[in-house]
Structures are given as structure tokens and as C-alpha cells.
Image (cartoon, rainbow, N blue to C red):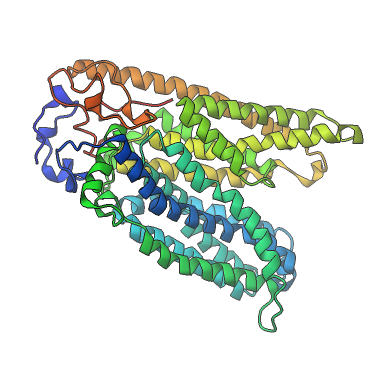
Amino acid sequence: MELQHDSAAGGVDVESRSPAIHHRDVAAAVIGDERIRLTEEDNVRIKRKTDKTILVVLVCIYFLQVLDKAVLGTASLFNLKEDLGLHGNQYSWISSIHSIAQLGWQPFSMWLIVRVPHRIVMPTLVLGWGISQACMAACKNFGSLLAARFFLGLFEAGCLPLFGVITSQWYRRAKQPVRVAVWHSSNGTATIVASALSYGLGRIPSSLLKPWQTIFLFTGLLTIVSAAWGYWRLDNNISTARFLNEREKQQAVERLRANQTGTGSREFKWAHIKEMLLEPKSYLWLAMSVLVNIGASVASVFGPLFIVILGASWAARSAKLKSAVLASFMVPVIVGSAMLYALDRGPSQKALLVVAYYFLAFMFAGNPLIVSWIVGNTAGTTKQSVIMSVFQTGLAVGNIIGPLLFHEKDAPVYLPGLRGILGVFVVRIACIGIQVANLVVLSKLQSKKRVKNGKAAVIEDHSMKTTYESYDDGKDSSDGAGMPLGQQAFLDLTDRENDEFVYIY
């Protein structure tokens, strides 16, 4: 099952690669070099099966991650500070240490996502933060609570990067925005449930446990049990998917060929990291992630609203322009910020102030759209894991910086903070525009590379079709040398290495 085409036909000299290298993608174990036929009905059936298994796991685990993090605020209403003798800025440190731990963990996270099977790494992380959460019930002072929260953040740090990579390895690029939105929107649901759950648990009479101890112990044990459930339900990749039969595994791999991002590899490639570090788009993704979470500090009461996230992701899928949707959803945020800054706080302005504040809810369309934009524009397992870890780093930095913009001396209107937030949103739109220009340049470079390699300058992007369409169904089914397109899709090449990769805007 050796690929036998040269650099003139394929963009890279695959004959010079050993089978151990260019067959690293797990798809090789399923289809090798074969082309599998499937219909739109097959595509829909496999997508639904994947949703019922993989997507359900992502939604439930992400829900628990946010729930375990969110109950700190509600537990504090049940005399947590008084019982542990917290004073001064100690509670602020308890809140911030979670993000600080996430910063330190990212280099390990990017390696684990590649080297350790997902069915192992995800339950392990869940078990780790579940134990950390449960241990918070046993804390007696500031130091012990700080340590427990540190480990909670440490284990949770790999969650979002891992979920982004999993989504890219199971779904076509056209379907990724909505899937990311579905599991990410459990963020808002978990925030709401955290309040209701804490209210109920905190009122359970007990001579052994204080109310806040009951809350931490219950949520921690729930997460620990869920780690076993996650291991039972999740599959490492398509080749080992227990919910698909052998024919469906082949079809599931084939339907992802047009993504040109592969289905996963266990080889950690330093060349992928080097390429990522040298690309301007990596730093623009980082800037966007920092900026969106700095801005979120002004409207954290909303949580990521379900309807906003799904609406934005549906629009991005329909328009096939993530950048335009992302930028358009920032316009109401800028308008709302400007209104909060300019309007006085008199009784006559209350209605407008409420409208302005609710405009800020549109900012929560940002993270899921950026995640799907990143994974859709990044190929190579190592490169994807690294850039998603960089994205998580940006989120952690934004969480730390955001609250620092608002000082008690500026209360109650916080005009300097609002001015800073307004600037953040404007800069974010600028970053989106610069990223689009950068992707246009990269697309032109890809076209030149294809022409040099004897292929058509423009390749139709089948991965963004609303319904499934193979290369054979399109006008560009082969390159200039007569070789079928898509031969490089499962070689674990990066987007820059693969001349058939099509960037999406």
C-alpha cells in the first residue's frame, strides 16, 4: 500500500518517505490507498452515529468542566471565605490560580493530545480534575484550597485543545462550526446549573459537612464517575470506532478526505511546531483568543449564551465565511460598549443601558467560531494540537488580564475599564481583517505551488459543501499528471506541506 507518485504530482516527495512516516495517519489502517464510494445517505447516517457517540461525550464532559469551575462562586455564598479564614485578595488568588495553572500546563497538553490515545487522555484528565474538585471539600485553609484549585486548572487545561482536535478528526469542515458550538454552548448551561445545584445542595442539612463542602464533594464525585463513563463511550479514532461497522469505518474516513487535515497520528513532529511558530496566522489566532477573553470580563454574568453561539455557528456554516460572521457579531458588542461608556447612569437611561449590556452577549459567539476557524485552517496532528494549546494559552491570559482593567476606585461606572474594553473589541475586528488578508496570501501561494506541481491553480473545496461530494464527483478530480486528488489527505502533512489544502475564510 505504498503511494507511488512523485513531487511533480503531489507537492511533496512521498517516494522518499518511508511507509512508517507517510502512513502514520490512522486512516491507513482502514482504507490504505483505496477510494471508497459513499452516498449522501451514507454520509448523513455516519454523521448521526458520530453525533450520538462522540458529540454526546464532548457535550457532557465540557459541561462538567465548566460546572466544576463555576461552583466556586456559588459555594462562596455559603460561608466558604469565613470558614477558611480567607482575607484580603486571597479569594481573588483562588479564582486566578486556575488560569495560571492552565498557562503552565499547555506544553504538556500539546504533547499528550498527540502521543496518548484520546480514550485514555480524556478520562485521565477528567479523573484528575474530579479528584481535585472533591478534595476541595477537605480544605482547611487558604493554602490547601489554592493547591486544589491549581490542580483543577491543571487537569482542565487540556480539555478545550483536545476537544478542538477531536472535532476536526471526526467531522467534515462544513459541519465543524455547529459541532463546536454545541459542545461549547454547554458552558452557559453549566453556569446556570451551577447556581441551581448549589442552591439545592447548600440547603441539605448535615452534621458532618458544611454546605460548601457538600457542593464540592458532590460535583467532584459526579466528575469522577463520569471519567469511567467517558472511557466506556469514547473511541480513539475512526479506525477503532465501535459504533461503526467495517464498511462504515471506511466510509467515515473517506468522507473526511476533502478536509485534507487527516484523521490523527501518534507521531509528535517538531517540524510541525517550527512551521506553526513561523506563521503570522498563529499569532493572530493567539491575539484573538486573548482579546475575546479580556472582553468577556465585562459581561461574565451572561455566560456564553446558547442561542448566540448556535446562531453564529449556523450563520458561519451557511455563509461559509467564518471571518465575516465573527466580525459582524462584534459590531453589536462595540455598539454596546460605546453606549455603556457614553451614557450617563440616570434613571432616564436605564432602558438604553440594559439594551447596551445585552448587546455584549454577542461576544460569546467568538470562541467557538475561532476554534472551528483554527482547526479548519490547520493540518497535521502535531500542528493542530500545538495551535489549539496556544489558543488555550490566550484564553488563560485573557482571563487574567480582563479583571485587571476594572479597579474599585473607578466604581460604579468603571469608565477607564469600559474604554479599554471598547479598544479591545476594535482591535479584535482588526485582527480578523488581517487574518483574512493573511489567508488570502496563503491561498495564492498554494495556487502557485499547485501550478508548479502540474495541478490546477484552483481546487474546488469539497469539504465545505453542504452535502457530501467526493473528488470524483467534481470538475477537479485529478491533477495535471492524471493522479486523483486527495492522495495526500492522510499523510499527516501540514497545511503548508500539502499543496491540495484549501484555506477557508
| Residue 339 in the figure: left or right of residue 307 | right
Name the quadrant containing residue 473: top left
Regarding residue 442, the answer to whether it shows in the image is yes
**Viewer-closest of 251 and 297:** 251
Regarding residue 290, the answer to whether it shows in the image is no
The image position of residue 135, as x and y in percent, is: 55, 72
Q: Is residue 297 above or below residue 92?
A: above
Residue lying at 59% horizontally and 55% vertically, measured from the top left: 190
**How many labels were placed on the picture?**
0
| Residue 218 in the figure: left or right of residue 359 | left
| Residue 430 in the figure: left or right of residue 281 | right
Residue lying at 60% horizontally and 38% vertically, measured from the top left: 308
The image position of residue 413, as x and y in percent, is: 81, 39
> Dividing the image into 4 quarters, which one contains the C terminus?
top left
The image position of residue 236, as x and y in percent, is: 31, 54
Name the quadrant containing residue 95: bottom right
For this orientation, the residue located farthest to the bottom is 207
| Residue 191 in the figure: left or right of residue 378 | right
The image position of residue 192, as x and y in percent, is: 65, 54
